[in-house]
Amino acid sequence: MSLDFARLGPWLEENVRLQGPHKATKFSGGQSNPTYLVEGASGAVVLRRKPPGKLLKSAHAVDREFRVQRALATSEVPVADVHALCEDESVIGATFYVMEHITGRVFDDPRLGGVDKLERLIYCKEIGRVLAAIHSVDLTAVGLTDYGPSGNYFRRQIDRWSGQYRASETQPIAAMDRLMVDLDRTCPEDDGRVTLVHGDYRIDNLMFDTQAPRVRAVLDWELSTLGHPFADLAGVIMQWQMPPGDQGRGLRGVDRAAQGLVSDEEFVAAYCERMGIARIDNFGFYVAFCFFRMGAILQGVAKRALDGNASDPERGRKLGAFVPLYAEAGLEALG
């Protein structure tokens, strides 16, 4: 997945005024769209591209990432400035876009190691503030009223990810089969809530200021669309319910009060207060849905690793082993 500057170099000079000589360094981590720091004589930018090989339909939509970040540039949601989109695959062999390079701090672990205990609650509140800002975007003002289909978000997402899971299935997983059936059976009726949703809102997709508990940019908008805001909220809680450590990256079993971290209940209550919501009924369904969707995503990662076109094949194979665990956790959340 190295970048060939024979054609990319002139394109960068013409479209983003990044003068050569150029060099690229691939960012580690991330399993979807390969991302690079591209440096030149006149500065640095970030390039994000589709991966090579055969891809699932509608996956790796870097053009949508580009569009939503450009639209949000005038909103209260912190995003990186995007510079240019290239849909001419002859340049590097895939569609890609270029955005500004922001320096900041990204946490892989929600335990917030390295942050003073007294400051951790402020970071947690900042995560909730930015989430509410995403769900409060005026879709008309930013030109995103057509950014997703109408109708029951959870119904179409269950259908979509069930199809994606089946297309990347490598072996039967009984818990995943049962979870899909149970989600299909318990999917709530459409309540009319429609906002911009990020689709993968979690701490490692947030870049914080290096000196303050303030988000500088929300990253990785690949799964964004118009949909139900409770999916994003439940996604945060889903992540926290995973075990801590390099793979789970969660907070299960962590004494949060002792560590200065917010509880699930406190985070949800603060979100509801910001959004003017009295309460959220049947929250377990939304959490179960998020476990299911993440399981389907990881199955796709595992399949790409087997096919040889994953961004990080070794890690992709390891993450595939978590699919049954996510499915079991989804069943547990449903009760």
Image: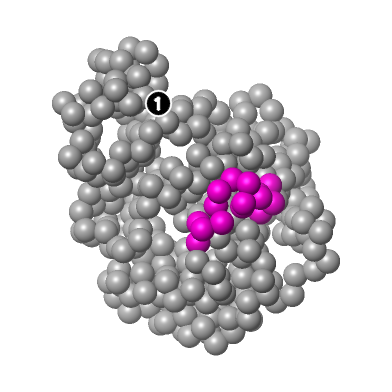
Residue 154 occupies which quadrant of the picture? bottom right
Q: Residue at x 69, y 51 (%)?
A: 136
Q: Residue at x 63, y 81 (%)?
A: 189
Q: Is residue 131 visible?
A: no
Residue 176 occupies which quadrant of the picture? bottom left
Residue 136 on the magenta segment? yes
> Which quadrant is the C terminus positioned in?
bottom right
Q: Nearer the viewer, residue 10 or 285?
A: 10
Q: Residue at x 24, y 41 (%)?
A: 88
Q: Nearer the viewer, residue 321 or 31?
A: 31
Residue 236 occupies which quadrant of the picture? bottom right
**SS at mark 1 in the image:** strand
Image coloring type? one colour
Q: Is residue 208 left or right of residue 44?
A: right
| Amino acid type assigned to the residue bearing label 1 in the image | Val
Q: Is residue 286 left or right of residue 54?
A: right
- Residue 248 percent location from the top left of the image: 51, 56
Q: Is residue 317 visible?
A: yes
Residue 112 on the magenta segment? no
- The residue carrying pointer 1 sits among few (fewer than 14), some (14 to 19) or many (20 or more) residues within 10 Å by Cα, namely many
Judge whether 200 appears above or below 323 on screen: above
Residue carrying label 1? 45
The region drawn magenta spans 133-148
Q: Residue at x 63, y 46 (%)?
A: 141
Q: How many marks?
A: 1
